[in-house]
Image (tube, grey):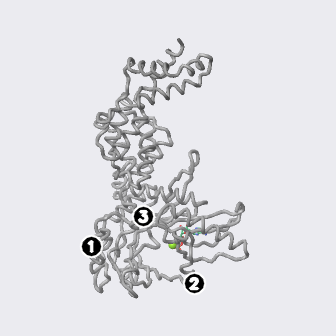
Amino acid sequence: MNEWETVIGLEIHAQLATASKIFSAASTQYGAEPNRHACVVDLGMPGVLPVLNRAAVNMAIRFGVAIGAEIGHESVFARKNYFYPDLPKGYQISQFEFPIVGRGQISISLDEQNRKQIGITRAHLEEDAGKSIHDQFPAQSGIDLNRAGTPLLEIVSEPDMRSAKEAVAYARKIHSLVRYLEICDGNMQEGSFRCDANVSVRRKGDEKLGTRAELKNINSFRFIERAINYEVERQIDLIEDGGSVVQETRLYDSERDETRSMRSKEEANDYRYFPDPDLLPVVVTAKDIERIRAALPELPEQKQQRYISEYGLSNDNAELLVANRDTALYFEAACNNSAAPVAQLANWILGDLAGALNKSGLEISDSPVSAEMLALLVERIADNTISGKIAKQVFEAMWQGEGDPDAIIEARGLKQITDSGAIELLIDEVIAANPEQVEQFRAGKDKVLGFFVGQIMKQSQGKANPGQVNAILREKLKH
Ligand code: ADP
Ligand code: MG
């Protein structure tokens, strides 16, 4: 494997979060009854005319500005002609020669030290097609045109990625960015964020790119990695066995974890692109661009820097918090008006909370423990009401919906014992019950200290303040 180099370029379709379609007034709402949201324009009726949705244009510009790309001052819609039952007009309105967003770049982080710039070739606006439904009517296919005419931004990368991991990091970065920009909901299950991976291999040192296969039907980040890895192995095996890769589109089958040929280059369509005579070029002025630039929200990298300088977070934690916009919003809501130490809050969000969410398959926006409640819990650790260990119990109870931390601490009697008289009593009991260990300690066996602490904590059901226990215990054992 070592003499081979993998080359990957991604084409990402991000569904733009407009209320209505790109060329009609029909709703873009997901999940409606079939063909409820398909008007005469989406149905491709003769004589109807498309009218461009300005909101989709502004969202595309927003993306372009955020990646420092050139914005096309006069971009042009073109017809991409092909036949398919879910494409009633017989062509898709897209952009070809003159896309709205030109060259830009985005930086991905590979590990703590290494970042890499990935080139973005272009991003263009287009309309989505409808859906063919093959599993509802025996021997017949259904056509649902609700999705027809939904605005898409197709983001095309340069073939700059060199491993499946890099491709996933890039896809995640774009995903995070479109969510921050609020131009796409990023829902991969519903198909609002789709990824095609172009994959080729070449011998290390070769200048020329190998022949590529385009992988479609990948609907999760995990599958991007798997599909690419499978495909890379397939291509290397093929070449090493004396064969050669043919340029084709392949479908990823996640159940079998393999890619299968869908159509070859020979069967590929000649799309006969030409400018759509029904639509004028889209004119974007410098003023439009400036207005959109001025309204950009704080972006992940800026946020990350702010978390480091303002809150003193580590680079790693700051990066983890900003990777997902909802996590960053949760963190900020938790910090807001809270006396909880920020670094501890970050640890709770990235540790216990992330673990619990992951285990139950929930998104942070659906967390049963709100940001305010988590902040309260961390405050109670900081003000010594409970220990960090007991806090885990309280968190568990909050997760189960037992109320706010103070109520849980009260109801379950979990308050930390900080009364030194009470702690002394506990210690005396444990010392009296274990004379042998006391001898061992006095003979220089420091390790038994841990045994005593363990016993005392057990006696107090974890509620004794560990710092006090340690200090008082040492004092008492000396004599
Ligand atoms: P098409 O229009 O046929 O989809 P493009 O030239 O626009 O082809 O390329 C589409 C994607 O394929 C881009 O993301 C590009 O980076 C990537 N790509 C092109 N050539 C290769 C290659 N040899 N290996 C891997 N990716 C490639
Ligand atoms: Mg393509």
Cα separation between marks 3 and 2 = 31 Å
Q: Would you identify the image quadrant in which residue 71 lies?
A: bottom left
Q: Residue at x 42, y 31 (%)?
A: 462
The residue at which mark 2 appears reads as 266
Callout 3 environment at 10 Å: few (<14), some (14 to 19), or many (20+)?
some
Which amino acid type is shown beneath numbered disc 2?
Glu
Q: Is residue 378 above or below residue 140?
A: above
* Camera sees residue 310: no
Which amino acid type is shown beneath numbered disc 3?
Met
The residue at which mark 3 appears reads as 188
- Disc 2 secondary structure class: loop
Mark 1 vs mark 3, foreground winner is 3
226 sits left or right of 304 in the view? right
Q: Is residue 329 above or below residue 7?
A: above
Image coordinates for residue 376, horizontal then vertical, percent: 33, 36
The residue at which mark 1 appears reads as 26
Callout 2 environment at 10 Å: few (<14), some (14 to 19), or many (20+)?
few
Lower position in the chain sequence, tag 1 or tag 3: 1
Image coordinates for residue 159, horizontal then vertical, percent: 57, 64
